[in-house]
Image: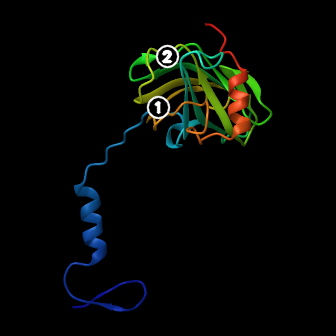
Amino acid sequence: MTEIDNSGVDQPKGISRRTVTKAMAWSVPAVAVAASVPAYAASPGIITLDGRACKLPGRSNDTYKGYAFGIIVTNPYNVPITVTITNIELGGSTLAPFTIVNLDGCTLVGTSGVVPAMTTLDNLVVLTSDAADSANDILSANYTITGGPGGSEEISAAVPVTPPVNGASCDDFTTAEKDCLETFVVPAT
């Protein structure tokens, strides 16, 4: 006897694919797992390091024993968000004090700033002072987000070779950008 489906086409004898599929669905237990995950967890992060880095060594300028790290801040949400950097460490040593400088216009932002909805700020620099040493290591930063989904995130990346910002050895920043960075004294915490 031949099994016929609704289309009127003859099916081969034996077990149908539909029967096998039904059996498989019942043989695997259904487990529902719910986890509280912030909406931005799947994104690469609000703040990313862009790979630019230079040292501010010794007493060569007003910012003593510091670093300049290029960052990109992205707000993928339809509402403004406030991003506050709460901590920066290099190789486990805290880099404080620190501030953010917007190289577009050479303006001091501070440790917190509002990012308009659906905006990327791609010419920012975290400027630090009073580093324990000038070694290249793993840089990590913690920051909070107010508005949008809220919450906090952490970034971590290996710091590239960081030549002194003075002179020609640091070519990650233009001459005008280096001149801008050298005008700021990182406020004490």
Instruction: Work out whether 112 lies above or below 102.
Output: above
- The residue sitting at 55% across, 38% down in the picture is 169
- The residue sitting at 66% across, 15% down in the picture is 62
Q: Where is residue 183 in the image (x, y as percent from the top left)?
A: 73, 22
**Gap between marks 1 and 2 measured at Cα:** 37 Å
> Is 42 in front, or is 75?
75
Instruction: Work out whether 97 lies above or below 28.
Output: above
**Label located before the other in sequence (1 or 2):** 1
- What residue would you read off at disc 1? 36
Q: Is mark 2 on a helix, strand or loop?
A: loop
| Quadrant assignment, res 48 | top right
> Is 133 in front, or is 16?
133
Q: Is residue 165 left or right of residue 7?
A: right
Residue lying farthest to the left in this orientation:
14
* Crowding near the residue tagged with mark 1, few <14, some 14–19, many ≥20 C-alpha atoms within 10 Å: few
- The residue sitting at 66% across, 25% down in the picture is 100
Residue lying farthest to the right in this orientation:
105
- What residue would you read off at disc 2? 131
Instruction: Work out whether 28 lies above or below 149.
Output: below
Q: What element carries label 1?
A: loop
| Quadrant assignment, res 171 | top right
> Is 46 in front, or is 72?
72
Residue 46 visible in the snapshot: no
Q: Where is residue 80 in the image (x, y as percent from the top left)?
A: 74, 32
Q: What residue type is labelled 1?
A: Ser
